[in-house]
Amino acid sequence: MHDFNQELYLSDIAALKLIQAKVKEHSFVTKGDVIGYLKHLSDKRVLPKASLTIIKKQLQSQNLVFTPEGKEIISQIVKDAHERDEWLAALIDVINNDSIGVSLLEKYVEKEKQKYIEEVWENEAAKKYKEASEKVEAIKQELAKHEKLLQQKQQEVTNAQTRLDIIIEKENNTDEITQHIQSQREAIDKELLSKKTELEKLTEKLQKHSKYESIEAAIKKVESTLDVLEERKFKLTGAVDNVKSQLNLAEQDLQSKLRELVPYVSTIIQAPISSDSEYLSFKHNQEIKHEVITDIETAQSLISNIVNTIAASYYDNYGRSYSNAFIASVLVAFFQSFISVFAGPPGLGKTSFIRLLREILKLDERFLEVSVSRSWVSEREFIGFYNSLSGSFSPSASGSYQFLKGIGDDLSEQDTSSILLLDEANLSPIEHYAASMLNIADKESDKIIRLTNEELKIPETLRVLATINHDMTTEPLSDRLLDRAPVIPFELLYDDESDFSSDTVDLKFSYGLMDQLFGNNSFLKRNEAGLDGEVPELLGSVIDLLGSNDPMLGKPFIQSKRKQEKVSNYVSVLTTVLAASCNLTIKQASLQAVDFTVLYFLLPKINGSGFGTKNRLEKLLSLIEQHNIPRSKAKITDMLARGEQNLDTFNFFHY
């Protein structure tokens, strides 16, 4: 036996026999094994079942202890028991602790003991030998690996020794060293010669500049002259600044004096007005037709003919395509509201639409177009001002004063409507230059514009139409204006599909006749049967949703009582007008009337930002989509799309 790496290895298997005497016990069978095997014999009917039962019981006893050798003997006895009856009896005697059985077992144990020990230890030795062989093989492989590594290291040492020998040989070769030193010396000599040549050149240059002190003196002289010039420049700059300051003071003084002269110059330029006789009222047109509507059929026929005639005139005479429904919505808004606004981007024909309406309605001189300027800040630019020096009124260049004086005596039964067109009205805040117009927009107003020295009477026939754009050069519309005026978004309606019929009529109608058909107190509104119940409910739902104070819906857009009254009048009259002019049922006309009402009166007030306003618009769109009102749906959809592109800022006037 050998010791290697703290492990013991057996080299001679025969040596195992030398340690047989040291083996005392080896467990090779259990009680369960004996019982199981006896049961096997009993099942084969080799042993009587009663005997086997007694044997099992005795073997299961906790007080009965067998040595391993005894168990082996019992096992062998059981093997032979099926052939020899005396063995069966002996087995029973053993279990019953009989002296004869015990003696028999002792003899058998002695006989079989040597055989068993040899078999067991041969198996154990074979197992140990196999394990030892495997470890020896592993050690051999490890040893081979170390030998290979040792060979590599030896080769590296050999290579290093070879290189060392070469270096030593080179170092011992004095001839090569001498040659290398000589080469380096020649290179240094060459460089020294070059430096010497360069030094000679520099020496030559230095000799040429031997008068260095005189040159330095000249430089100082030039620098002194430069200082003198800088001082003179500073003094001249101060003199220039002083002159500029004096000029500014003189200019301010001159401007003050000119301002003092402005009233005098104004008096000279604008000659005083001696009397109002220069502004005569416009003549009454004798061809104007007027009548009092007394029956529904006449009212419906006239409405249909008027709407058809206007739509046909736009198409036939000017190539403009507008539906009867759109024309009807504009006429009702025109006659029910003192101020109406036409909104939309440039180029859609807002201004030309109103100009052509003048021709179609035969308004003649009862039409004035005023181009608003960005510099307008008060009614002085729009109407004029009272000149205290001359004691008279000086009208503005817009012609508004003369126009208002001319229509002052118009009568609703004898004259047509009058239109004052404010083109590009929001270039300046409308509330500033047209404040008096907003004041008389309410129905309870006395319709008088009070100037310093006189009053202008505004007839009920006058309507103010304003066209606006929305960009960086314009002013937003105030809630005060939006509360009083419908806003007609021309971008949705300018290219409507025309659907007029051949029924036309001469439009030389008085304002009073048109008001009976399209105004707040329309004949059809007073006499037509009740409207479909769905319309007021839908319109009320829209108003409630816009005015809801739910914090999740952002800022509310509350409609005033004035606005709600206008909305009620507009939807009631427009329903009957649409039914008459577009061949619609009351229910169909009602839904279209609600569509125009929401679009013209309710949506223009929306101007908010953030998640809440978006939520409100989405809920409003969901409500609108449940009904057939496409114009409002298109506008809300457009507002949502443009709002998302403008940092969640939602505005009716984004184009």
Image (spheres, rainbow, N blue to C red):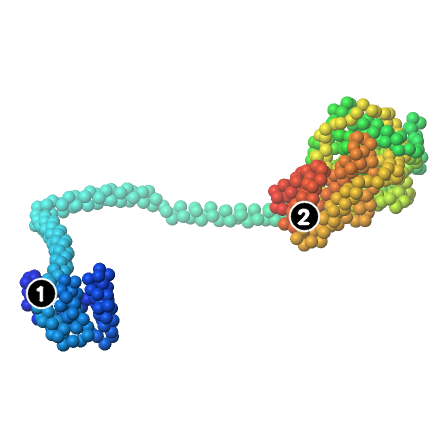
Q: Nearer the viewer, residue 598 or 128?
A: 128
The numbered mark, 2 or 1, whose residue comes first in the sequence reads 1
Q: Is residue 506 left or right of residue 631?
A: right
Residue at the spot of label 1: 115
Query: Where is residue 83 shown, x and y percent of the image?
Result: 14, 62
Q: Residue at x 66, y 39 (%)?
A: 638
Q: Residue at x 92, y 26 (%)?
A: 287
Query: Is the N terminus in the top left, top right, bottom left or bottom right quadrant?
Result: bottom left
Q: Nearer the viewer, residue 281 or 451?
A: 281
Q: Residue at x 29, y 44 (%)?
A: 202
Label placed on residue 374: none
Q: Is residue 474 left or right of residue 240?
A: right
* Number of numbered discs on residues: 2
In this orientation, does residue 410 appear?
Answer: no
Separation (CA) of disc 2 from disc 1: 104 Å
In this orientation, does residue 198 appear?
Answer: yes
Q: Nearer the viewer, residue 217 or 165?
A: 165
Q: Amino acid at mark 1?
A: Lys
Residue at the spot of label 2: 616
Q: Nearer the viewer, mark 2 or mark 1?
A: 1
Q: Residue at x 73, y 46 (%)?
A: 542
Q: Secondary structure at mark 1?
A: helix
Q: Nearer the viewer, residue 445 or 227?
A: 445
Query: Where is residue 319 shown, x and y percent of the image?
Result: 74, 24
- Place residue 290 in its image quadrant: top right
Query: Is the C terminus in the top left, top right, bottom left or bottom right quadrant?
Result: top right
- Place residue 632 in its image quadrant: top right
Q: Secondary structure at mark 2?
A: helix
Is 227 situated above or below 294? below
Query: Where is residue 615 shown, x and y percent of the image?
Result: 65, 48
Query: Where is residue 228 shown, x and y percent of the image?
Result: 53, 48
